[in-house]
Amino acid sequence: MAVMARRVTLVLGILGAILAFAGLILYIKAPYDSIAIATLEALAVTCLTIFLITHFELLRKVSRRRPVRLGFNSVLLVLLFAVILGIINFLAARHDVRWDFSETKRFTLAPQTARALRDLPRDVKVTVFTNEKGQFGIYKDLFENYQSRSPKLTVEFVDPEKKPGMARRYGITRLDTAVVESGKQETRVTAPTEQEVTNALLRVTRDEKKNIYFLSGHAEHQLDDSSEAGYAFLKKALEQQGYTVLSLSLYESKTVPSDANLLVLGGPQRPVPAQEQVLIADYVKGGGRLLVMVDPGSKAGLEGLLARWGLNVDARVVLDEQKILNGDLTMPVVSTYGTHEITQDLGNILTVFPDVRPILWDGTKEADWEFHALAKSSTRSWASPEVKGQIRFDPAKDAQGPFTVAAVVIARKEPAAGARRSAVVIIGDSDLASNAFLNLAPGNNDFVLHAVGWLAEEKGLITITPKDTGFATFLVTPSQAVALLALQVLALPSACLVAGIVMWRHRRRL
């Protein structure tokens, strides 16, 4: 009986070695088939463990022989170390803990993504068509991060070369395409970036798209204008977030559409007629949400409209010594934000406000409206009615900063059941959202889309700033290069060689 058991365990040992080797080959050939690899390796560990336990007495007897005692002790230590590592890896797999030590935290999901994953309303399936020739590794790392945050997300990797039928069924025409599905909704991702993937998750879990209307007819920034002054980039960014972006002429429609989730005044330069201002005021009064971006020198004539909500725009221009490199004083770089949901995820991100005017608050409206400053210029800023050629503060005509350059007012009156609470966000500059400046600084894109997301009552993702890889050139002086050469090429290898010789001579004497 004992002989039979030893034969069986010997077979198990050989089978375990074969399974381990097969798992290694499968990992090399098809690393995306994680279930098969894990099954093979688990069976291999089980077989080898049984073999080691049943033959431990034989190994112990062999180890008593003097010629093999020292070598066997080393092998035993290696095996013990391997077992410890195996236990640690098992615990790490069962209790996922991640640390990101990269300089820019490029492997850490943004707070907006974490919130979106936490609030997923239903299950989402992702099918990634890729292989080792494409961006399999990038997709795999990214989706492992996502799956660790939400059990509602399932991901399947498919090699279109090995499963062409499945690729044809999904209509895949290019490698590295991820198909995101939820319910009846479907969208596709062709770039393995956090922003693209999270936007896709939000799009497929929404049954209805929210509508954003941009007022037109008063020389505002045009949505389809791809020049530096246009809003084409902003329109694309909003559509990527899942919004429907439309242009609105109140002269033609005579009313703000009932399906408008947000109305935007994107830098009107010509007068907005009184009749249209009344329509805008009635829209806000009925629970509407409004984003106003008005530049210095604008002839829109919105002072009376803004005064309804306790807001006023100073006619002067903000100059700030805290500006972009080689930039003008009229391009303040803002890093001071107020406490509000719109700015809660901005942190120390910089926002550039080119040619901005101060926002003032009328305290007499305090009973009806709640005011929050969103962004302020630095303490080295001032407001001046004349900016041409000015390089320093003039106490005779200028006002010392800091100044509020963006703010929000919220109606204090409790809305009726099913109605929204009125709110207005005002920014003393419209160029920060233009094609020329939207992506100039990370904060420009973030700030505008945060404001839009909050006004549209978007509870999911607002925006994600792409993370820089943080790679930097390593520069050394000639003396440092010599020191590194001496240490790495000469000293360390020589020390290892000497230590090995000493150890070998010591063991020879035993």
Image: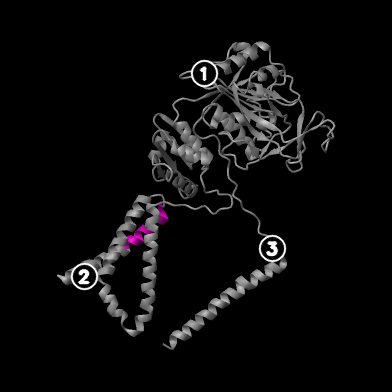
Q: Quadrant of residue 378?
A: top right
Label 1 – label 2 distance at C-alpha: 78 Å
Residue 14 is covered by the magenta coloring: no
Q: Earlier in the sequence, mark 3 or mark 2?
A: 2
| Residue identifier under label 3 | 476
In the displayed orientation, state which residue is furthest to the bottom.
509
Between disc 1 and disc 3, whose residue precedes? 1
**Disc 3 element:** loop
The amino acid type found where label 2 is placed reads: Arg
* Image location (x, y in percent) of residue 109: 51, 44
Density class for disc 2 (Cα within 10 Å; few <14, some 14-19, many ≥20) is: some
Q: Amino acid at mark 3?
A: Val
- Residue 24: x percent and y percent? 38, 59
- Number of labels in the image equals 3
In the picture, the disc for residue 271 is none
Instruction: Name the residue type under label 1.
Output: Asp
Image coordinates for residue 392, horizontal then vertical, percent: 82, 38
Look at the picture and state if 442 lies above or below 307: below
Instruction: Tell me the SS state at disc 1.
Output: loop
- Mark sitting on residue 259: 1
